[in-house]
Image (spheres, rainbow, N blue to C red):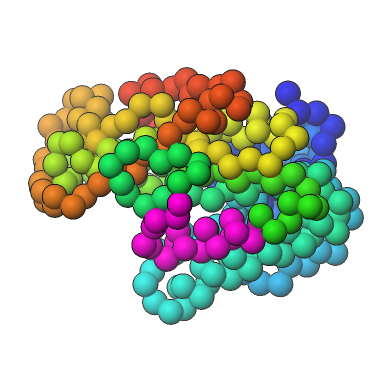
Amino acid sequence: MMKNKKILISGGTGFIGTYLVNALKENNEVYSISRSKGSQNNVTWIQQDLGEELDTSRLPSEIDIVIHLAMDPLRGESTKSKLKGISINFLGTYQLLEYAKKASAKTFLFTSTGSIYGNKENPSKEEDKFDANDFYSFTKYAAELLVNQYKENFTIIILRPFHPYGPGQKDSFLVPRLIKNIRNNETINVNNKETPKLSPIYIEDAINIILKSLKLNENLVLNAAGNKFYSVYDICEIIGRLLNKKVNYNFINDKNTKNLLGDMEYTSTKLSYIPKTNLEEGIKKLL
């Protein structure tokens, strides 16, 4: 268990951030930057939009660890939306890196995304090249390249999560959205019964990976994925069975659809950790 560290978390009111703040706040001095103020006690909340100039006067002059979770998901296709995404995902990252440098941070952990690998047939390994074609993944990969320029200043950890899910997640994300749709008897668009396959990771497993990675004093790039693969159809069938609902499907059958899977061999070896919660157990906790 990590103790007596001064930690800055960006995005502390987000899905992953809320769980991480709860895991760290009792035994450490935790600060959180977010656009809204969180409700947890024993945390110093700093309201700040990372798409704007960072007011470092409100941050501690020295810090041990910076954990950068804040991001813009770039849901819109407008130029305004994309400029906002660049501001938060890239320029916001730059501002936190510069702050970490000046505040003598020992470790900087950046959460990227598993989608930077692009969709492919086989699970993606950390050494695989960038192969995505969506704007969000471009901004996250550009931020990864930027983060790596600071290796001489502090230990760098880059985490690439694959479809994290769990209680408290907004229904704009995959698993809670499917639960909502199936509950409401809405038709689910799926490619077919086999593809695309995904490797969702339960939130508690994702948090454990973050905490364990922070104990290693070395530069790391780590996938954070579940250790089993499921097609979207499989996920829907599990939800339907648990809700006692018949799922209505619209099969698209695009032969070019591929998978988005994370290979966990390297992460499991480095951290001596294997994700513990299977998908059915995890979904039960959302119902």
Please identify the residue farthest to the right as the structure is shown.
Answer: 61
Q: Outermost residue, bottom direction?
A: 79
Is residue 42 rendered to the left or right of residue 16?
A: right
Q: Is residue 184 on the magenta stretch?
A: no
Q: Residue at the spot x=70%, y=35% of the render?
A: 214
Q: Is residue 277 left or right of residue 109?
A: left
Where does residue 94 sit, x and y in percent of width and height?
68, 64
Q: Is residue 174 visible?
A: yes
Query: Residue 135 colored magenta?
Result: yes
Q: In the rendered structure, which segment of residues is drawn in magenta? A: 129-147
Q: Is residue 174 above or below residue 51?
A: above
Residue 99 location, quadrant = bottom right
Q: Residue at x 78, y 48 (%)?
A: 154
Q: Is residue 189 left or right of residue 128?
A: left
Query: x%, y% of residue 287?
Result: 35, 30
Q: Residue at x 12, y 32 (%)?
A: 246
- Where residue 274 appears, as percent x and y from the top left, is 50, 22
Q: Is residue 273 above or below residue 213?
A: above
